[in-house]
Image (spheres, rainbow, N blue to C red):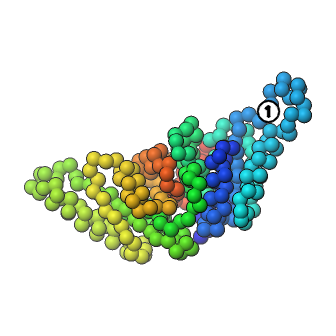
Amino acid sequence: MDQFKVAMVGLDLSHLDEVLIAQIKSLAEILDIEKVYFVHVSKNLILPEQVSQAYPDLMAPIDETIKLEISHEIEKVHPPLQVPFEILVKEGNAQDTLLRWSKIKDIDLLVMGRKKVRTLSDSLVNNLTQKYPHPVLLLPEAQKPLHIKNIFIPIDFSDHSRVSIRLALQIVAKTNGRIQCCHLFEVPKGYSKTGKSFEEFSTIMLENAQSDYAGFLKKNDLPELPCTFILKQNKDEADNIMKEAKSNQTDLLIIGSRGRTKSAAILLGSVAEKLVNSNHEIPMLVMKEEGENMSFFEALFKL
């Protein structure tokens, strides 16, 4: 695969960095990553003048100290990272700085961590996933090694679903894993006007969804893949997806980003957005079609 040649990993100098560095090492081989940028953004890299004058030998410049700390974390990974990497320590607003440098370095994949409990960093992760024009990989802080054997893909038969499945096929070809698709369907509110019961109409909608799935696979020249069809009733779509993903012991959840309108392509589809907000347990890759959000991205920074 060639869509992930250059990856950027956001680090915050917490215990989560160790997890991200270790996991990107295994992912680099699976995703054919050719270079990794480890990036930390600090609001301020300058010591207060009073402190620097009072203690001139206190420490090296802050950015160099942070680079050294990150370098030590990378060296602790065994076996070592096999692809070239570079450490960037920048000053400024975290969101704007990460977006700007991802553009400057022509990044294909943005990698960020998710902590088990909600923190202030959640807002940054959610916003970057919304605005970044290329795929975003979110990794939870679980210490276990990342072995991608079971891939779970919620699908809606769109181009985004096609992109997600094609990527998953490339991954399992390397890991000898399996793919499980999932599609949510619902009974229209006006079903009672047809004279049929809820159960009867749900069967009709299920058969229609199964037919659409078969047509989707044929149209896109995709192999037969198992797909679970879930009747959406009262639960939120994201809740249904997470429940099914957990029951499948999912190692990687791949979700397609869907722009709500062409002019507002910066926005994730509602289901993808809810999954980004709520999923702190399963590694998740948010796929985006090539060029999606790019005009907004370029206009934002006038690069």
Give the residue furthest to the top.
50
- Residue 50: image quadrant is top right
**Front-lying residue, 32 or 18:** 18
Quadrant occupied by the N terminus: bottom right
Q: Position of residue 48 (x, y in %)?
A: 80, 27
Residue at disc 1, secondary structure:
loop
Q: Check disc 1 and report the residue beneath it.
A: 46
Q: Which residue is found at the position 56% from the left and 53% from the top?
A: 142
User: Looking at the picture, which amino acid does disc 1 mark?
Assistant: Ile
Q: Position of residue 199 (x, y in %)?
A: 16, 58
- The answer to whether residue 216 is left or right of residue 103 is left
Q: Which residue is found at the position 76% from the left and 57% from the top?
A: 75
- The answer to whether residue 65 is left or right of residue 173 is right
**Front-lying residue, 298 or 58:** 58
Q: Position of residue 223 (x, y in %)?
A: 42, 76
**Mark 1: few, some, or many residues within 10 Å (few <14, many ≥20)?**
few
Q: Which residue is found at the position 77% from the left and 44% from the top?
A: 66
Q: Which residue is found at the position 20% from the left and 49% from the top?
A: 189
- The answer to whether residue 157 is left or right of residue 167 is left
Give the residue furthest to the left.
195
- The answer to whether residue 160 is left or right of residue 127 is left
Residue 153 shows in the view? no
Residue 144 shows in the view? yes
Q: Position of residue 56 (x, y in %)?
A: 90, 31
